[in-house]
Image (cartoon, grey):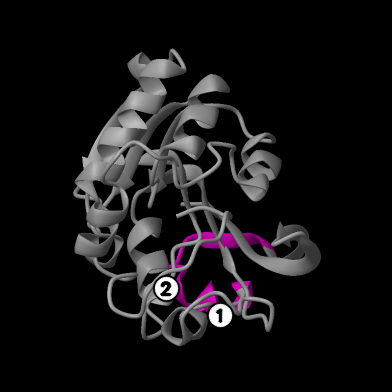
Amino acid sequence: MSEHEHDPTETDFFEPAGWEERYVGDDAMWSGRPNPQLVTEAGRLTPGTALDVGCGEGGDVVWLAQQGWYVTGADFSANGLARAARHAEQAGVADCTDWWQVDARAFAAEGRRFDLVTTHFLHPPDHGMVEVTRRLAEAVAPGGHLLVVGHAPSAHHTQLSESHRRAMWEAAELLPGLPEGFEAVVVEQRPRTVERDGESFDIEDSTLLARRTT
């Protein structure tokens, strides 16, 4: 997923099959530009290894690779990962990327560690993002960072389904998902101006950045 909105249905937004269907064909769903909070926060870090969970078409993966990171893009959609791999090839960063098909709700690090683990606009149902945060934190190397960004609840998200709006969250709600040994660096609702149908309005990006200290 990305900051660029679309019109999901009630039945397919949360499951792989719906996204496999969305990523069939050649038309891009997203802009290809990196998400702004990633640019802000990762731009302050020394490049190393990164994991982008819910990478979709790979815009954030490509940007990180262009900044000198070695990036693993993860998504539960095989079609999305195929698109992302093509975009990395077209951008000349394929040698700095690899791919992992996994559902964030069942994510297990299995001993893999990254200097940066990031996910943007992932909204599992039933308040599942706290558990996803806990799972992703296990993949952060000592001294590394976890960046989790999502849509804050807003009356402006009228184009989205009711179930998707209920799945939105604020940054502070994810703090219980941080295991022992993490310190919260940023817990903010960051305003951002977007445009839809020729109208501009402000929304908030729920932004949690945490560092693994041990």
From the viewer's perspective, is residue 188 above or below residue 11? above
Number of numbered labels in the structure image: 2
- The kind of secondary structure element at disc 1 is helix
Examine the structure image and report whether residue 178 is included in the region drawn in magenta.
yes
Residue at figure coordinates x 26%, y 63% from the top left: 18
Left or right: residue 201 compared with residue 66: right
The residue at which mark 1 appears reads as: 173
From the viewer's perspective, is residue 68 above or below residue 200? above
| Nearer to me, 196 or 169 | 196
Residue 94: x and y, percent?
35, 18
Q: As shown in the figure, which amino acid type bears the numbered disc 1?
A: Glu
Left or right: residue 191 compared with residue 25: right
Q: As shown in the figure, which amino acid type bears the numbered disc 2?
A: Met
Residue at figure coordinates x 43%, y 75% from the top left: 130
- The kind of secondary structure element at disc 2 is helix
Residue 112, picture quadrant: top left
The residue at which mark 2 appears reads as: 129
Residue at figure coordinates x 20%, y 45% from the top left: 78
The mark nearer the N terminus, 1 or 2, is: 2
Res. 43 in view: yes
| Nearer to me, 8 or 154 | 8
| Nearer to me, 120 or 165 | 165
Disc 2 crowd rating (10 Å Cα; few below 14, some 14-19, many 20+) is many
Residue 3, picture quadrant: bottom right
Disc 1 crowd rating (10 Å Cα; few below 14, some 14-19, many 20+) is some
Region rendered in magenta? 171-186
Q: Which mark is residue 76?
A: none
